[in-house]
Amino acid sequence: MAAETLQRLLKLIRDGASVVFLDGLPADVPGFSRLEERRAQLKEVIAQVKFTKSKDADWETAVIGSGAIARGSLAALEQKLHRWREPLADQGISLVRRMWHDEALYFLVNQSGQPVDGWVSLRQSPYGLRPASMILLDPRSGKIGRAVARVSEEKNGILSSTATR
């Protein structure tokens, strides 16, 4: 990775972003032009990051400004993030979660190849948000309808059905 690219990432981190590197920070720069000079620049940028080890030896983090940078093995990352895993992923459903103003928007896609009829569980929001409404959109048929939802302190869910209301 070029030193300039890592420098831009560090600026994003200072501004509040979280960045994860699998197995470690970049070890070298691309290409051969001014190779030694660019390697020295990369080492200089990397030296700005001071990691602290977590309880397990496979994971390290560094707080920079209002963001954080982490590095570790894929196994350590999966273990660390397991509590944030959406239960619907076990049903073959992918999701994108975005914050928009004060709302959390979820875009769910069934990539399992099988229809999903029944309750699909959503993890409790880490932001303390509760869904105000849920809408089902079927791109194949063009059907749009309000989803049947159950919202409680313990569990959120959406009733997925081939028939929309």
Image: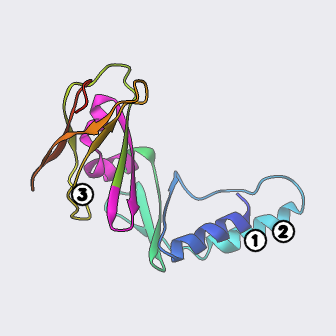
**Would residue 78 be counted in the magenta stretch?**
yes
CB atoms of marks 2 and 1 within 8 Å: yes
Highlighted range, magenta: 77-104
- Judge the density around disc 2: few (<14), some (14-19), many (≥20) Cα neighbours within 10 Å: few
**Three-letter code, disc 3:** Ser
Residue lying farthest left? 153
Quarter-wise, where is residue 24 in the image?
bottom right
Q: Where is residue 83 in the image (x, y as percent from the top left)?
A: 25, 51
Q: Measure how far apart labels 2 and 1 are at the Cα level.
A: 6 Å
Mark 2 highlights which residue? 37
**Three-letter code, disc 2:** Glu
Q: In this view, does 14 lie above or below 21?
A: below
Q: Would residue 95 be found to the left or right of residue 84 on screen?
A: right
> Mark 3 or mark 1: which comes first in sequence?
1
Q: Where is residue 4 in the image (x, y as percent from the top left)?
A: 73, 68
Q: Position of residue 94 (x, y in %)?
A: 38, 37
Q: Quadrant of the N terminus?
A: bottom right
Q: Position of residue 131 (x, y in %)?
A: 22, 54
Mark 1 highlights which residue? 41
Residue lying farthest bottom? 65
Name the mark on residue 125.
3
Q: Nearer the viewer, residue 3 or 24?
A: 3
